[in-house]
Amino acid sequence: MRRRGMILAVLLAAGPVWGQAPVGPSTAVLNGARLGLFAEYGQADTDIIFVGGAKESFDFRTAFAGFAAALTDRWDFFVRVGASQAETAGFDGDWNVAWGLGTRATLLKWNDFGWGALIQFTNLVSRQETVILPAIPEAPPEQAEEELNIAEYVFATGPTWRHGPVSLYGGFLLRLGDGEFEIITGHSRDQFDIDSRWDAGGYVGGQVTLFKAGPSRTYGFSRCDLTVEGRFTGDSNGFSASLLLPFGGAY
């Protein structure tokens, strides 16, 4: 009992993460190119609730590199691979492998305005090596690994306005997260589940084309887009920045 109570106390202090990966415009972003490479960095402040009602606030960071492909001139698919890191009082997780995939499509388009929808999945992991005091005072401390594993599903929809090299976007965001926090020693594994729940909010961002290649570069990088966005829901808020390099010629 003492050991389990101490593990629970560590967990409440550690406050594992309800992640929030970057979203970007809900409309197609390649804008006529066949392929694209992108890099992203994001931060989020989040409150999460565990099964049983425990609640904790934490900081979360993500860094991704990704690849996008046009399925049509209005429909993109993307994958991202990188790392995630979480921290709060009593928990300072390392950067560990994270990945995700998703798709976005322009559903309606009229002059400079478009309306789109995005669906994405992201898996986020952060670990920490720590020491746990045993239940028997005379016994030596135990080496332990604390691991947070989050699965996040996001749906977003909203308008995008693009005029020349500048675009603005925003809309409605709905998130569903699942996951657990584990404390692993040489002879035991204790798991604490996160309370899966829907979290609604919004997102807003802007994008500017930093440079655009001439028409002679048929299969090279056609342009470079810088995107900055903010996200907010009932339990969290986040910020991210990204660079996109479309290439591969016109679709």
Image (spheres, rainbow, N blue to C red):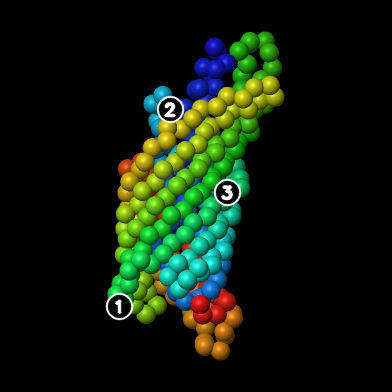
Instruction: State which mark lies toward you, 2 or 1.
Output: 1
| Residue 92 in sight in this render | no
Q: Are marks 1 and 3 in contact (CB under 8 Å)?
A: no
* N-term mark: 1 or 3: 3
Name the residue: 50% across, 68% down.
71
Horizontal and vertical percent position of residue 86 = 52, 42
Residue tagged by mark 1? 111
**How far separated are the C-alphas under marks 1 and 3?**
38 Å
Horizontal and vertical percent position of residue 136 = 63, 10
Horizontal and vertical percent position of residue 117 = 38, 60
Left or right? Give the position of 157 relative to 102: left
Q: Residue furthest bottom?
A: 216
The vertical placement of 203 against 212, above or below, is above
Q: Quadrant of residue 239?
A: bottom left
Numbered tag placed on residue 51 in the rendering: 2
Residue tagged by mark 3? 98
